[in-house]
Image (tube, rainbow, N blue to C red):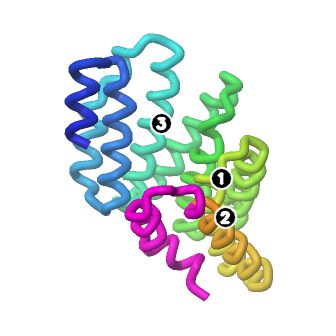
Amino acid sequence: MEIALRVVNELQPISRPWVMGTKAELHLLAGELEPARSTIEQTQVDLLPEPLRSGAAIRIEILRGRIAAAEGDLDGAVEISTGILERLRRLGIRPFVPAALLLQGTSLAALGRWPEAERALREARSEAEDLGHRRVLWEIVRELSRVCAAISNEEEAVGLRDEAGRIVLEIAATIEDERLRTTFLARPEVQAVTAA
């Protein structure tokens, strides 16, 4: 990641916020919340021209919400995701909607607000399918499975978990680098949907 930042700083500084966002996401995936938050704070999306500024700002806000949720500030994560969704709908921007709805749905579920969580995740699934966003689709389907299990819809929960596993395996089949594929398949959340 440091190599990518050095290259960006030297050759294309305009791309720095996107690389910083990726760095923050990697820290978040590794459970390193303080470095993720610090990286987000160092990301200066306001220096970007439009439309790059809006896209980067939305991505960074989603990451802020995910960090808040990981730190246990679930109400804050719901508030962030609601703000993002209002902005996206006002501007008519769809590509970030599935990720924002996933953040909202998982945060609502963690608060035990099952009907709201289910609505958000079903909408997220529909949006992700319409847009062909398979990378986020498997996560949405996995979370929807958890919500269905919590509201005693075990049959649908099992079907959704199996569906998430199929999507994951399809994604893994497209990863040519064996080391990256193995790392992806070893992630605990991936294992949870691919284990028989």
Residues packed near mark 1 inside 10 Å, few (<14), some (14 to 19) or many (20 plus):
some
Q: Determine the CA span between mark 3 and mark 1.
A: 17 Å
Q: Which residue is mark 1?
A: 134
> Which residue was labeled with disc 2?
167
User: Mark 3 sits on what residue?
Assistant: 59
Residue drawn at x 64%, y 46% is 98
Q: Which is in the foreground here, disc 2 or disc 3?
A: 2
Local secondary structure at mark 1: helix
Q: Is residue 193 magenta?
A: yes
Query: Is residue 69 shown in magenta?
Result: no
Q: Earlier in the sequence, mark 2 or mark 3?
A: 3
- Tell me where residue 109 appears, x and y as whole percent: 59, 66
> Label 2's element?
helix
Type of amino acid at the residue the image marks with label 1: Arg
What is the residue that sits farthest to the top in this orientation? 49
Of the pair 69 and 156, the residue shown nearer to us:
156
- Which is nearer the eye, 84 or 73? 84
Which mark is on residue 172? none
- What is the spatial separation of the Cα atoms under label 2 and label 3, in whole angstroms? 23 Å
Contact (Cβ within 8 Å) of mark 1 with mark 2: yes
Mark count: 3
At a point 69% along the width and 51% down the height, the residue shown is 124
The residue range painted magenta reads: 172-196
Q: In the rendered structure, which disc, 1 or 2, sits on the residue that comes first in sequence? A: 1
- Location of residue 4 by image quarter: top left
The CA distance from mark 1 to mark 2 is 7 Å
- Name the secondary structure under disc 3: helix
Horizontal and vertical percent position of residue 66: 43, 52
